[in-house]
Image (cartoon, grey):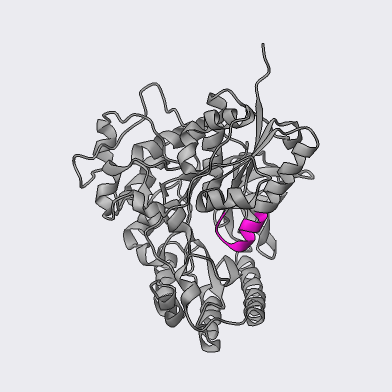
Amino acid sequence: MSQLTSVHLVTLGCARNEVDSEELAGRLEAGGFQLVDDPESADAVMVNTCGFIEAAKKDSVDTLLAAADLKDNGSAKAVVAVGCMAERYGNELESALPEADAVLGFDDYSSIAERLQSILSGGKHTAHVPRDRRTLLPLAPAERQAARSAALPGHGDLPLIDAPELAEAFTIAAPDLPIGAAPDSGPRAIRRRLGSGPMAPLKLASGCDRRCTFCAIPAFRGSYLSRRPAEVIAEAQWLAEQGVKELFLVSENTSSYGKDLGDIRALDRLLPELGKVDGIERIRLSYLQPAETRPSLIEAVAATEKVVPYFDLSFQHASAAVLRRMRRFGDAESFLGLLDVIRERLPAAGIRSNFIVGFPGETEDDLQVLADFLSEARLDAIGVFGYSDEEGTAAVELDGHVDADEIDSRRARLVDLAEALIEQRAEDRIGEIVNVLVEEIEDGTPVGRADHQGPEVDGQTSIVRGRAAVGELVRCRVLATEGADLAAEVIR
């Protein structure tokens, strides 16, 4: 029996990219490739790049160059770029980075195994010419599902079949739109898990309809398109069969889920259905727009037992003047009002957000508005980023650009404040009862995340008293803190 051709997948960027990598892995495996963990033993290295900001693009290029070095050592025969940066730049990246043997876009994903086999056999792949992927779907959200033809990473291509029980659960306004469901024999996800942890991201939608002046994502990810509810549930069932305990629901804009299905409250209805999936013990939402975080969604989170009280809110700033220049909605007062509504219903809710400082036109008064907001908001996690021009975005053309050194200074000031506020918020939780999903054992100590801690960026909880196994969801009491991290004891 001949040995299978091996491929090593490297994933950069966000949790959405992780889902895309697992789709690629599933398609490659189905096409006869063997997935390997060691890049030095692989026949091919595929890098799922990130193209969000300059630092991420540099990291992607550096990773591709490091992979290309393996060819000089006589191990890898090909290095291939996929993902957001590859899609965004296409033939431009191909010309600028001859060390990569091919640059593949989203349209290549459905035939990724054939593409890679051809490249390994000496075939030449001509990279695509970059285009605005928003033009691939109708402008009107309600027309997109029926018109969908372009490749969309993370969207299954299973045939749609009748599903009366799901049709009853999800009353879609457009009666001629099939909801779709997995076959009776069980869900068949086009996905192969690359990790073994008890948490997995689950993509709800692709693309974004917002036109934030600092963001280029919609142009290369396309317009917003929801996955059908039954497709999401089928994949959740499959993930549960793989040992997943926590679903991390991801998209570019989760609070818009269902807008193109004719039901803006589709997410409110989807959460209870996901909560019925056997084996899933915890469900977490990511990336909610404040203006779309409606009372019914807050109630759905509160009323669905398995959904954790966790709100990843995309504030970006608190000054109304800066937000208008970003083409976003809200101000400090309305944001604080939203936080009050959430905490009135869910007093222990975990809330996180990211902020951009030094945006064109930002004044010292604007920065003070943001600092005052952070002091009042009592957020569990705060990300602070300095603004940088991103090609192809409207912000590049705005007046009032802030000097780079001044941006660094403002960011440093906000980071210092954020770290103090995060530490204080964590200390507020001492004595609180939390549910911890154990993800690893470090030097004999179970380590995981409490309900208010999202994956990777919100701190962790170490169980310093009591025992727990990986994958176990345990009830604990918080004993102490260090920064955003908690130390806790098991309560049986």
Q: Image quarter for residue 33?
A: top right
Residue at (56% x, 80% y) in the render: 371
In the rendered image, residue 52 lying in the magenta stretch gets the answer: yes
Percent across and percent down for residue 242 are 55, 31
Give the magenta range: 51-59
198 versus 160 height, above or below: below
Q: Is residue 200 left or right of residue 278?
A: right
Q: Is residue 233 left or right of residue 350?
A: left
Q: Is residue 196 left or right of residue 350?
A: right
Residue at (79% x, 38% y) in the render: 72
- Which of these two is toward me, 23 or 459? 23
Split into 4 quadrants, where in the image is the C terminus? top right
Residue at (65% x, 74% y) in the render: 415
Residue at (62% x, 58% y) in the render: 56
- Which of these two is toward me, 23 or 269? 23
In the rendered image, residue 367 lying in the magenta stretch gets the answer: no
- Which of these two is toward me, 271 or 96? 96
Asked whether the viewer can see residue 15, the reply is no
Percent across and percent down for residue 52 are 55, 58
Q: Magenta stretch mostly in which secondary structure?
A: helix
Asked whether the viewer can see residue 60, the reply is yes
Percent across and percent down for residue 477 are 63, 55
Split into 4 quadrants, where in the image is the N terminus? top right
345 versus 336 height, above or below: above
Q: Give the residue furthest to the left.
A: 175
470 versus 451 height, above or below: above
288 versus 405 height, above or below: above
Q: Give the residue furthest to the top.
A: 1
Percent across and percent down for residue 86 are 55, 48
